[in-house]
Image (tube, rainbow, N blue to C red):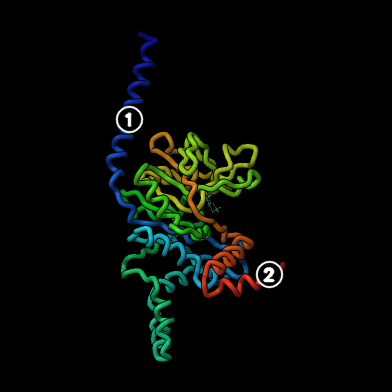
Amino acid sequence: MLKRLPLARSRSKNEGSLKKLKRFLSKSMAQKIRKAVFPVGGLGTRFLPATKALPKEMLPVVDKPLIQYAVEEAAAAGIEEFVFVTGRGKQAIEDHFDISYELDQTLGARGRVDLVDTLRSWMPDPGQITYTRQMDPLGLGHAVWCARKYIDDEPFAVLLADDLVLADKPCLQQLIESYHTKPGNIVAAMDVLPEHTDRYGILDIEEDKGQLVSVKGLVEKPLRRNAPSNLAIIGRYILMPEVFEHLSKKNTGAGGEIQLTDALAKMVNSTPFYGLRFDGRRFDCGDKVGFLEANLAFALDRDDMKKAVERLVKSYT
Ligand code: G1P
């Protein structure tokens, strides 16, 4: 009798998790990803003094601010509601996604319809963007948690504007397609140098199928010697709303911050979890060299600039 007890207990535990998994699958299978969270409260200290009065998300790559790339990527992937988690001094972002009547009028009067079109190239419908303030910069996990009321009980996307991806098919679209065949939490992933694991959330791989990887654990910014792999999380996520339950505990992790990675790590046993090695090239625009490289790559990708930039690059080599 005594011997059978643990067995019975573990069976009922398994049945419990099976039920949970079934409930999760039926709930999430058909659910479209309609909402995206953009954490834009960061201070941008790596770009001071440029970011003293200018939100780092407004830094331009060629002629478009980083945040616009992220929003356009989300819109192209079918996102309908955009939730910005902002902070003090970020008003320029709100103004950017609004109509500028003075500019429209002045440019119109000068016959520059082309520029008016550029200004309106992507504009949300009224009410499509929501802004909430993080108030305290307590970490990425905290920023995402601040969006909980707007997300409610449906799977959603998170995009970090610092991570800019040049791809034929938008990175978020790739994640969403993957999510529809394999529902669960899914993050964009990229192999990084082993000595760089301490810059990223790192995946503990259960099964590596080349592009799609199933994940059994995650660690935020581990040193090389403690890293479970060198497969890093890039700033694109599809997340199940249960993540808010874990974030609400406000546990702190690496750097004393409330880490999104830690909350996700708590979900691996109850929610399927994947990393997707996306097609495309990612630029770390939170880093000066990465930002410069993004400018080069995006300029070289444009027909109107390619030749001139190639000539310029040649003159430096
Ligand atoms: C954040 C995440 C980290 C992820 C990275 C991607 O870190 O916490 O897991 O790998 O974004 O850019 P941060 O760059 O904000 O320190």
Element at label 2? helix
Q: Residue at x 58, y 42 (%)?
A: 230
**Residue 112 drawn at (x, y percent):** 43, 86
**Residue 187 drawn at (x, y percent):** 46, 47
Element at label 1? helix
Q: Identify the residue under disc 2.
A: 314
**Classed neighbour count for the residue bearing mark 1: other residues with Cα under 10 Å, few (<14), some (14–19), many (≥20):** few
Instruction: Give the label, 2 or 1, closer to the camera.
Output: 2
Tell me which label, 2 or 1, sits earlier in the chain: 1
Judging depth in this view, the residue of 238 and 152 nearest the camera is: 238
The disc labelled 2 sits on which kind of residue?
Lys
Instruction: Identify whether 287 is placed above or below 205.
Output: below
- Distance from Cα at disc 2 to Cα at disc 1: 60 Å
Q: Residue at x 49, y 45 (%)?
A: 261
Tag count in the figure?
2
The residue carrying mark 1 has its beta carbon less than 8 Å from ligand 1: no
**Residue 282 drawn at (x, y percent):** 54, 56
**Residue 26 drawn at (x, y percent):** 27, 40
Q: Is residue 206 left or right of residue 311?
A: left
Q: Is residue 278 left or right of residue 272?
A: right
What quarter of the picture does the C terminus occupy? bottom right
Q: Identify the residue under disc 1.
A: 18
Q: Residue at x 49, y 71 (%)?
A: 64
The residue carrying mark 2 has its beta carbon less than 8 Å from ligand 1: no
What quarter of the picture does the N terminus occupy? top left
Circle number at residue 104: none
Q: Where, by quadrant of the figure, is residue 146 drawn?
A: bottom left
